[in-house]
């Protein structure tokens, strides 16, 4: 059964930041307030008793968080309310950052892609969060805001552990920006699942290549999604595999064995690099 919780839905950013300041990190009601975006993760966790949140602050009414803007010098901005399906249907994303569409199309089911947000995905800080790997390859920055001001950081510094992010009490991710430098890159994305339907990754790899740079990111093979160091674009797949094995630390669990994950990471790196 779903435990009882309070629900607030601010209509604009000023109201949201005030509520966040009032209800997070302080004793009393709302001590464990959290953001509600698509709700596809948090509501399941509350129902299953894994999340003890007693106040949800819904951001869906905040219009400016629905922005999905492309600019030829600044790149792409993805607001906190942008869903998978909005990303997939956007013509600028299709043209300039197709790796995002490739990854987004592999998340969950159509129902989930209609409701779940890209930023909700990275805020879950799951090692298996699918969008993390293509966003890492593209050099995404996370834009964070609280009543005290705003700050930005590289996505690779945002993940601090399983379900742990760099967010402090009262902060929210309001957008992600993707610089223009990796626009129009060649790309590949592979995700291994136990079943054909919706499932989290057992192991997954994204690679983008542009001009002289090749970037590789791996999901479900360490406590956080992993971005390897930048390679020159003429690097061999053997060198990338060697570097990948130094950077990941897969475990045996119900989804896959450590050895199978390692085998598939090597297979995917070679397969994508042969193609792009
Ligand atoms: C059946 C099923 C299948 C799934 N399949 C996949 C899959 O294939 N791949 C995958 O990666 N994930 C999968 N998921 C996990 C989840 O649905 C996705 O990660 C989704 O993108 C979460 O987004 P949301 O908007 O629904 O987040 P929510 O559930 O609203 O929020 C998730 C967490 O992020 C926080 N949060 C949300 N937005 C912000 C913000 N702007 N700032 C700060 N914190 C925020 C919330 O407080 C909460 O802790 C699946 C889940 C289910 C139930």
Image (cartoon, rainbow, N blue to C red):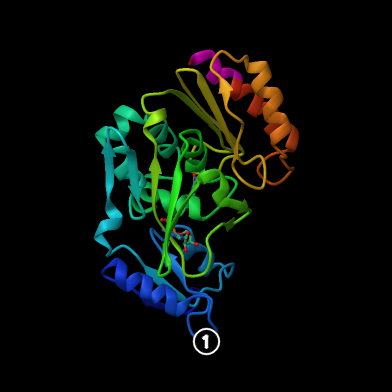
Q: Which residue is mark 1?
A: 28
Q: Is residue 242 above or below residue 69?
A: above
Where residue 80 appears, x then y in whole percent? 36, 55
Where residue 83 appears, x then y in whole percent? 34, 49
Front residue of this view, candidates 28 and 230: 230
Q: Is-magenta flag for residue 267?
A: no
Q: Is residue 75 above or below residue 187?
A: below
Answer with left or right where residue 272 lies relative to residue 177: right
Front residue of this view, candidates 221 and 155: 155
Residue lying farthest to the bottom in this orientation: 28
Where residue 244 appears, x then y in whole percent? 67, 29
Where residue 113 appears, x then y in whole percent? 37, 47
Q: Main secondary structure of the magenta part?
A: helix
Report whether residue 242 is seen. Answer: yes
Front residue of this view, candidates 68 and 51: 68
The residue under the point 33% across, 50% down is 82
Report whether residue 5 is seen. Answer: no
Answer with left or right where residue 254 lies relative to residue 15: right
Crowdedness near tag 1: few (<14), some (14–19) or many (≥20) residues, C-alpha within 10 Å = few
**Dot 1 beta carbon under 8 Å from ligand 1:** no
Q: Is-magenta flag for residue 273?
A: yes
Q: Which residues are magenta?
A: 270-275
Q: Is residue 199 above or below residue 36?
A: above
The residue under the point 28% across, 38% down is 70
Q: How many marks?
A: 1
The residue under the point 59% across, 57% down is 163
Q: Secondary structure at mark 1?
A: loop
Figure quadrant of residue 108:
top left
């Amino acid at each position: 059964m779903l435990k009882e919780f309070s629900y607030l839905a601010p209509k604009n950013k000023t109201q949201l930041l005030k509520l966040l300041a009032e209800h997070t990190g302080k004793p009393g009601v709302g001590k464990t307030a959290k953001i509600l975006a698509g709700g596809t993760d948090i509501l399941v966790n509350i129902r299953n008793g894994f999340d003890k949140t007693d106040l949800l602050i819904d951001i869906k009414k905040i219009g400016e968080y629905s922005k999905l803007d492309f600019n030829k010098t600044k790149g792409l901005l993805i607001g906190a309310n942008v869903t998978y399906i909005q990303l997939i249907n956007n013509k600028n994303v299709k043209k300039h950052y197709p790796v995002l569409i490739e990854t987004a199309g592999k998340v969950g089911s159509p129902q989930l892609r209609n409701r779940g947000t890209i930023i909700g995905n990275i805020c879950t800080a799951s090692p298996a969060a699918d969008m993390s790997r293509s966003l890492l390859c593209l050099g995404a920055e996370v834009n964070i805001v609280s009543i005290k001001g705003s700050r930005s950081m590289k996505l690779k510094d945002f993940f601090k552990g399983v379900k742990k992010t760099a967010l402090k009490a009262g902060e929210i991710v309001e957008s992600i920006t993707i610089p223009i430098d990796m626009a129009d890159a060649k790309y590949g994305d592979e995700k291994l699942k136990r079943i054909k339907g919706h499932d989290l990754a057992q192991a997954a790899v994204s690679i983008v290549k542009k001009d002289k740079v090749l970037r590789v990111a791996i999901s479900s093979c360490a406590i956080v999604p992993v971005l390897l160091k930048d390679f020159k674009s003429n690097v061999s797949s053997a060198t990338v595999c060697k570097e990948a094995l130094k950077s990941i630390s897969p475990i045996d669990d119900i989804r896959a064995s450590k050895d199978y994950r390692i085998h598939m990471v090597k297979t995917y790196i070679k397969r994508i690099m042969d193609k792009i």
